[in-house]
Amino acid sequence: MKFFSVNVVAASLLKRPVRVIRSAVRSASGGRLAVPDWLSEAVPDWLAEVMRPKKAPVPWPDMIRAVLAIWVPLAAGFVTGRRELALLPAMGGLLSVMIDTGGPYRQRVRRIGTAAVFGGAAGLAAGTVLHGRGWVAVAAIVVIAGVSGVVSRLGATGSATGLQLLVYSSLGLGPIGLLRPWWHTALEFLAGAVWAVALITPSWLLSPRSAEQRAVAAVYHALAADLRAIGTPAAAAARRAATSALNTAYDTLLTGRASASGRNERSMRLMAILNASHQMTEAVPALRAEGERPPPWVTDTIDRLADAIARGPESGAPLPLIPPQWSASPGALALRDSMVALSGVMSGDWTPPSAPPAPPDLRSRLRGRAGHLAEQLMGGRIAWTFTARLMICIGVAAAASEVLPLQRSYWVVLTTAIVLKPDYGSVFARALQRGTGTIVGAAGGAAILAVVPYGLWLLLPFGVLAALLPYGKSRNFGLTATFLTPFVVLLIDLLEPLGWRLAWDRLIDTLLGCVIVLAVGYAPWPAAWQAHLPAQFAATLRAVAAYMDEGLVTAWAAGGRPDWAAGGRPGPVPDPRSGRPGAGPAAPRPPAAPGSPAAPPWRSRLRRRAARSLADLRAEYQRTMSEPPAVSRRASAWWPAVVGLEEVLDATTTAVVAIGRGAAGPAPDAVHRLTGALRAVADAIEAELPPRCPGELPSDPALAPVTAAVRSVLALLTRGEPRSRGEAATVP
């Protein structure tokens, strides 16, 4: 796949839903999709692609765990004759099954626990309080939708928590809200979630490290072996092994990211570490051409760095020290620089070596964390637009449930919440998949209620459906709805046995919710018809470049060492409105008073603008990843570059802070060369042209961490070309 073929598909995504998805499918497959002959005329290409399940291995461990997490509480309730008490623990187990996406044990426990306490339990409590309160409940559920949208900005855990808060608040408006006391309802629900978390422990004991950690660590082990093999007969085999490890690592990370929701800090950290391997892969052929094999202590250090990647930051073990310069050859210097850059990415410390240490006091750390949290909650334009759409749709659905004669009206709100999803999920595809899956699932639920005798025999379909939930989740949203609908119908029937008519009510309410989402949350919002991922990436490149120009050059000048003081001419200063360089040399800025802690106002504004632009980029990426595979596969190619761009902003901010504390500043010309390279890439993206390598980057020591981060992004966009899953990477 050519990297910029994503531009053709993503730039016009959903402009006209039917036409665009059809063209996306044909551009991906080169012709009509393979469907049975008897369906070739009845099923349009675009609909077949929207509904097509993803290819994924059968998740047997997850299926077994789902049966134990959900079926065991239900069986206990049936055996003891307290079926209504089995409902809430089973729902707690259901939450854990639906939001668990794997990963390290601590992260999984934190994700499930946070979503269960602040999402599911809090939502059930709120729904119970609001049950039967009419228009007061309508207003309250709109407010809860707004809170859900804001909380969803706090990464993957926030995304899961925000969704569950809205979902279980909606469920609380139905028969579950009649259960009393409310705190008893919440405790039973949490008991089911705790039981499901306990079932994760055996798999963690057997395999404490995630597949993503092992894959990224394997890349650096393979590179160390490649360096040891220089000048030996095993060199060719070692090179192929390094190439295979790099391909596997990218495939593993991109596959995991495709099934995740929200911003996952662990996955982003692993992708940043993997991106840093580009510098090391460039050093290997240079050493091979020079015939120089690194000393054993150098390759041993790379192996120890790989071991630290596999252990993860939660181990708390210090990183190995980078060995001093052992050779003056270009390849050796490049290899040591790549090891320093890798250590910086792993530690998250972009501070230049000459900078004084950061203040260690607790107040400074808390202030930094609070600022980061506030920045995430603020989000960008896309985040606030989506929050408004979510609140409007939930308001319309809640109002419809009040005025229409519906038997199970709370399902309208529930469907609207799930289809619209508070973290920018695709509306059009999800609505189609949800509607189709619900039709099939409702028919299955009605058949089960009509055929299976009420009593212990219901445990059989409960167990089968529980096992199929992880399978459907690994395929697509529609297949998940196909298995989830009859399961929820059976659960609700435990409270109010109505037979097959309950499935019919579910079908009507679900289809009404899908119509509300498409008519209110999709059609009136032209921005939702298109994906702007390439354009947003280019805009973020310009915003980051503008902050680098203003922050690094002006921060250096503010220390009393302006570039024009030595007789030089100031470099071009970017226009603060567009981020583009000025037409000529700008007038000198007067330096700030020595020791003044205040930053120039444009620097703070450009920093916030760059952060908001990155937030919009993450939101746009998440939304595009929810689209059908023909589009999402191409969108996944951007993720390594998105992560790399965040590293550039972090390194730049750290350098600005260090310079403000008295560290040596970079030469303005070096800064402008870096920002010029970023803007050249942005120009190429906007022109739908492949970007060119900008040549040598500056070697200013004060700019080394920023240069290393920029080099990784440029390697991905020029030589490396971001890849979608299944495309080959090469080690030079």
Image (cartoon, rainbow, N blue to C red):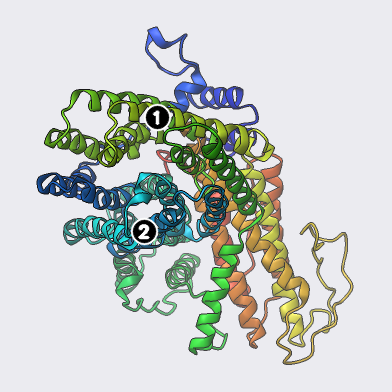
Left or right: residue 395 versus residue 327 is: right
Residue 505 numbered tag: 1
Nearer to us in this view, 453 or 402: 402
In the image, farthest residue toward the left? 79
Residue 672 % position (x, y): 73, 65
What residue lies at 29% left-to-right and 49% top-to-bottom? Answer: 91
Alpha carbons under labels 2 and 1: distance apart: 26 Å
What residue lies at 48% left-to-right and 37% top-to-bottom? Answer: 412
Mark 2 residue crowding within 10 angstroms, few (<14) / some (14–19) / many (20+): many
Mark 1 residue crowding within 10 angstroms, few (<14) / some (14–19) / many (20+): some
Q: Quadrant of residue 726?
A: top left
In the image, farthest residue toward the bottom? 595
Residue type pointed to by label 2: Ala
Residue type pointed to by label 1: Asp
Nearer to us in this view, 398 or 622: 398
Q: Would you say residue 373 is visible in this rendering?
A: yes
Q: Would you say residue 648 is visible in this rendering?
A: no
The residue that mark 2 highlights is 121
Residue 26 % position (x, y): 53, 22
Q: Quadrant of residue 190?
A: bottom left
Nearer to us in this view, 603 or 708: 603
Left or right: residue 341 versus residue 109 is: right
Left or right: residue 716 versus residue 463 is: right
How many discs appear? Answer: 2
Which type of secondary structure does the marked residue at label 1 adopt? helix
Which type of secondary structure does the marked residue at label 2 adopt? helix
